[in-house]
Image: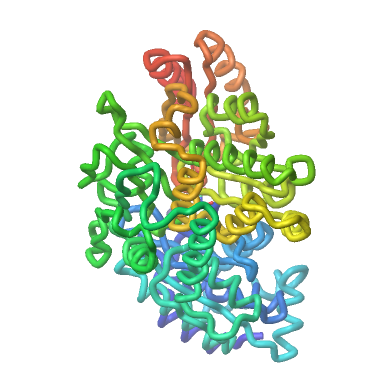
């Protein structure tokens, strides 16, 4: 399908990194930007093959390394409906990147790549080959975050896709990750001339609808002010653009919005910093209002406020789930639809034990636990519930509404509750977790429920918890089961953890290999801070 000569020339030009090992993991490829040009080139090919396997349908590509430091970058591939590339394709991306990156001359690398194609041109790739031979052209939409390395890396991807596949490419330039997911899905729906404006218009319209139903004018009723920390990332200009048309913009302050200084990205600010360090981002000084922090590509959000005792109170992904669960169960009741439409929450093992208890016992809402990684949560929410709310504790998440939801709601007599349900399904970016859309959803739910940040934070108390990292010689020996809550290997380790956990009140701990770092993570929670420190230490020692 490709000639050795053409490919070798492109390898010379665009694939300077070789003799390395790459893995397409939970968040795509990620690593130091200087090591990634071959990977980007490979991803261009994979995205084209994926598009061809879908008969030329639109595939999205986002160049970002999210909350990683500014020197890193990464890339991931998005399906026409805005969801992640199917898991089946991940090993293909890994193999192709590593084949292109073997040690050798560009001719040898090109040869190896072509024989890989021959060997792998079965199953998924066979359909790609069929459409390729029929002259179908792949279609890609691409974008990048604010990192300095973005333009060069993207050019490696575009070169391969254009030269080898004559792909049609719509380059959106700078976008947040969720904007790329949303605009990919809009393009795939056949909307013509999709521009970024479509994103702003969609979410503003949804807000205006909700606000009009509940008499929210130009002031959010339960908060005095909102501070947005955009991690000095691409979320900054995008949220500013959207909020410039927003009725309640008078209440908003921006901090860490210096996205044109890429070296400041994620530096002492952003969702990951706030969640991991349990403290305010740099520059936050609003002791009366609500704060929120995005991550570097604005697909994660956490909130926080200062309580009467001047204490930092974090409102993380578990709290967002709790707020939405409370809000939707109340709306379903008001609409008289609680027996017709199922509502459920999806969490991971990292969810605080008290949040799970609050959801199940206080709100009486079913909770599923799945493996870490957005794709697992998303899948469960899509397949299990009519309103599936999923959030990782770290702030990644969204809400998915089933086809049945739309059908049932449409058939109902109009009422405020029914229309609110409908409008909310527009306010939420269902393709992927979206800091901007989630933020609007949270502000609407707080306003309608008449909850202040304090009220939200006091619905339940988190069990003290710790997340620690252990560097081990080989993390691949840590094999988990039961949605990563238990280890099957190394042999005997789980039994020792169980023994240790038993000695602590409300103790819980699990160990899993990170999917994004060469490390093993140890999570622990217990009834009080001293006990959780001790438990973490003991389990860490067992792992080392
Ligand atoms: C990735 C995942 C995130 C998960 C994190 C866990 C996506 C888009 N991102 O960033 O959901 O929480 O990995 O990292 O799926 P870990 O495996 O290193 O603990
Ligand atoms: Zn992110």
In the figure, is residue 335 to the left or right of 106?
A: right
Q: Nearer the viewer, residue 432 or 104?
A: 432
Q: Residue at x 67, y 48 (%)?
A: 387
Q: Is residue 345 visible?
A: no
Image quarter (top left, top right, bottom left or bottom right) of the C terminus: top left
Q: Classify 94 as above or below 162.
A: above
Residue at the (20%, 47%) spot, across then down = 283
Q: Is residue 124 above or below residue 361?
A: below
When the figure is inspected, residue 45 is found, relative to residue 236, above or below; the finding is: below
Identify the residue at horizontal 67%, vertical 37% (top origin).
368
Work out which quarter of the rendered image holds the N terminus and state it: bottom right
**Image quarter of residue 137:** bottom right
Residue 326, x across and y down, in percent: 58, 37
Where does the image place residue 369, in percent across and percent down from the top left? 64, 36
Q: Quadrant of ligand 2?
A: bottom left
Residue 336: image quadrant is: top right
Depth check, front residue: 235 or 213: 213
Where does the image place residue 159, in percent across and percent down from the top left?
47, 83
Q: Which residue is most to the top?
A: 503
């Amino acid at each position: 399908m490709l000639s050795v000569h053409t490919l070798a020339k492109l390898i010379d030009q665009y694939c300077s990194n070789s003799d390395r090992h790459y893995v397409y993991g939970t968040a795509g490829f990620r690593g130091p930007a200087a090591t990634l040009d071959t990977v980007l080139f490979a991803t261009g090919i994979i995205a084209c093959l994926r598009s061809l396997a879908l008969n030329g349908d639109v595939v999205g590509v986002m160049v970002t390394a999210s909350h990683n430091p500014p020197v890193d970058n990464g890339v991931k591939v998005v399906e026409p409906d805005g969801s992640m590339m199917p898991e089946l394709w991940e090993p293909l991306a890994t193999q192709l990147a590593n084949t292109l990156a073997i040690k050798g001359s560009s001719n040898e690398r090109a040869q190896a790549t072509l024989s890989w194609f021959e060997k792998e041109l079965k199953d998924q790739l066979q359909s790609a080959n069929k459409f390729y031979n029929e002259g179908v052209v792949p279609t890609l939409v691409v974008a990048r975050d604010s990192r300095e390395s973005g333009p060069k890396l993207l050019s490696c991807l575009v070169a391969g896709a254009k030269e080898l596949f004559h792909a049609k490419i719509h380059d959106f330039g700078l976008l947040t990750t969720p904007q790329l997911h949303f605009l990919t899905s809009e393009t795939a729906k056949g909307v013509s001339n999709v521009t970024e404006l479509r994103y702003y218009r969609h979410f503003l319209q949804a807000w205006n609808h909700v606000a009009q139903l509940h008499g929210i004018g130009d002031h959010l009723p339960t908060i005095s002010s909102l501070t947005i920390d955009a991690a000095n990332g691409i979320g900054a200009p995008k949220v500013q653009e959207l909020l410039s048309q927003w009725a309640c913009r008078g209440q908003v302050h921006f901090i860490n919005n210096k996205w044109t200084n890429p070296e400041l990205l994620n530096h002492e600010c952003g969702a990951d910093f706030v969640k991991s360090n349990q403290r305010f981002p740099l520059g936050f000084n609003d002791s009366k209002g609500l704060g929120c922090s995005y991550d570097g590509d604005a697909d994660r959000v956490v909130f926080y406020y200062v309580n009467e005792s001047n204490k930092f109170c974090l409102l993380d992904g578990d709290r967002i789930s709790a707020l939405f669960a409370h809000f939707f169960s109340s709306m379903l009741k008001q609409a008289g639809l609680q027996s017709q439409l199922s509502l459920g929450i999806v969490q991971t093992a990292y969810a605080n034990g008290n949040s799970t208890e609050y959801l199940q016992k206080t709100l009486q809402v079913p909770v599923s636990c799945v493996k870490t990684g957005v794709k697992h949560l998303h899948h469960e929410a899509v397949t299990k519930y009519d309103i599936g709310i999923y959030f990782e504790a770290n702030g990644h998440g969204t809400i998915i509404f089933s086809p049945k939801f739309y059908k049932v709601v449409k058939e109902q007599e109009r009422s405020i509750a029914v229309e609110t349900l409908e409008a909310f399904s527009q306010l939420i970016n269902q393709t992927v977790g979206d800091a901007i859309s989630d933020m609007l959803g949270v502000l609407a739910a707080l306003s309608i429920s008449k909850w202040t940040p304090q009220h939200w934070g006091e619905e339940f108390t988190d069990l003290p918890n710790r997340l620690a990292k252990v560097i081990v010689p080989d993390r691949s020996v840590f094999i988990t089961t039961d949605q990563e809550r238990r280890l099957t290997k190394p042999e005997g380790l789980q039994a020792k953890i169980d023994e240790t956990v038993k000695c602590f009140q409300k103790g819980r701990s699990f160990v899993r290999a990170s999917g994004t770092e060469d490390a093993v993570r140890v999570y622990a929670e217990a009834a009080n801070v001293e006990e959780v420190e001790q438990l973490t230490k003991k389990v860490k020692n067992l792992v080392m």
